[in-house]
Amino acid sequence: MKIADIQFYSFNPGRRNLEVVRVESDNGYYGWGEIGLTSRDRAVGGAISHFRDFLIGQDPRRIGRIWQETYRSQYFEGGRVLTSAMAAIDIALHDLVAKSLGVPVYQLLGGKQREFVPCFVTTNARNLDDLLEEVKGLVADGWECIRTLVWGLWETEGQVFSPRESVAITAEWHTAVREAVGPGPVIGPDYHHRLSVAEAASYCQRMPPGTIDFLEEPIRDETPAAYAVLRSMTDIPFAIGEEFSSKWQFAPYIEQGLTNFARLDICNVGGFTEAMKVAGWCETHYIDLMPHNPLGPVCTAASVQLGAAVPNWAWLEDRTVDLGRLYSDEIFPVQPKLDGTWYPVLDTPGLGVEIDLDVIKEIPSRQAETPHTVRPDGSVTNF
């Protein structure tokens, strides 16, 4: 069996582009993958084109070797653009090979650890009253883990974010949420790496102990030492890792105990090949995976297969509420379906997702630039 073709498709089903890769073999099998770096997809598409040039004719079953060749073949190893392209190809290869064997992808990863993959949900409320009502409703619906938005993170006039104002208001919100729902539900906010160390510490210190169970991405991750300083100022568990593009980026966060939940993104980190290594490393430090899953059904399907195969699992991010309406059965005639608050682990061969090629060829690509966020003084801050 040899790789006959690698195709890259970009299409916009309603909110932003989805970018998928289809790898075909010379004996009629194919597999789907998805890229994670959606805001710079033209660069990733170019990388896939480079990889295609030397992958055509190779054995698609040599997945680990292909990973090494795509990572190391250009002298300048890695980087988010390349590992996002590698991830899509790696996921597609696992899908193709599993289909050729008539087994789900998780059988290639060591078999099934669980019968279903637990998920967490994210709130959409923009004020305290709506937030309290939404969280109470989610708890009533059976959600164990709820991630909340923070004040001022989205849809502010002129994309202005005021960190100190957000810290003060959000701390009040979460104190009220905990009082409203009691000690049972797992509650945590996502600060989208918009705070400084001092601002993040101030937020953590404004709430009674036990108010939140995790804090996601409070500061930028380029400097692990900064997270070590923040760790010394609070005992709240951190959920970090959605931006990491390799096991090497995860290394200091795992080894130094800087992350307590690994927010691995299988479509950015390099696919199943790299994700399984990160998962094993996390297991040695008793860290559970809590994967990032903000894309389309291919990413969800891959994440579910990963969740089926690894022992150290917390929750998968699920975006069915706000994104599911975009991914119709016409486009994705086979795709994972949420059952309550989890995804069942099925025995469908491959990933368990299919895309109607004729349909997506008719859906245009429409580039949507990520918002450029500023602080009140006009200086640039993170999205």
Image: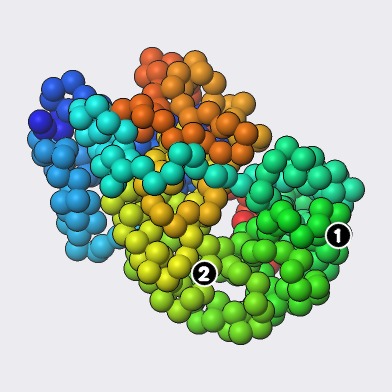
* Residue 70 visible at all: no
**Mark identifier at residue 179:** 1
Residue neighbourhood size for the residue with mark 1, other residues' Cα within 10 Å, grouped as few (<14), some (14–19), many (≥20):
few
Element type where label 2 sits in the image: loop
Residue bearing mark 2: 259
Q: Is residue 114 left or right of residue 273?
A: right
Residue 161: which quarter of the image?
A: bottom right
Q: Within the image, what quadrant is residue 193 found in?
A: bottom right
Judge from the rendering whether residue 268 lies leftward or rightward of residue 212; answer left or right: left
Amino acid type of disc 1? Glu
Disc 1 and disc 2: Cα gap in Å?
Answer: 27 Å
Q: Secondary structure at mark 1?
A: helix
Q: Residue at x 75, y 44 (%)?
A: 139
Using the image, determine if residue 96 lies above or below residue 295.
above
Q: Earlier in the sequence, mark 1 or mark 2?
A: 1
Q: Which mark is residue 362?
A: none
The label nearer to you, 1 versus 2, is: 1
Where's residue 314, x and y in %? 53, 54
- In the rendered image, the residue lying farthest to the right is 129
Q: Is 117 or 66 nearer to us in this picture?
A: 117
Rendering coords of residue 300 (x, y %): 47, 38
At which x and y percent is residue 196?
A: 65, 74
Above or below residue 109? Residue 196 is below
Q: Tell me if I can see residue 171 in this picture.
A: yes
Q: Quadrant of the N terminus?
A: top left
Residue drawn at the location 50% of the way across and 82% of the way down: 225
Residue at screen point 36% across, 33% down: 351
Residue 335 placement, left or right of 136? left
Q: Residue at x 48, y 30 (%)?
A: 336
Amino acid identity at mark 2: Thr
Q: Nearer the viewer, residue 176 or 87?
A: 176
Question: How far from the left and from the top, in percent, is residue 107?
Answer: 28, 40
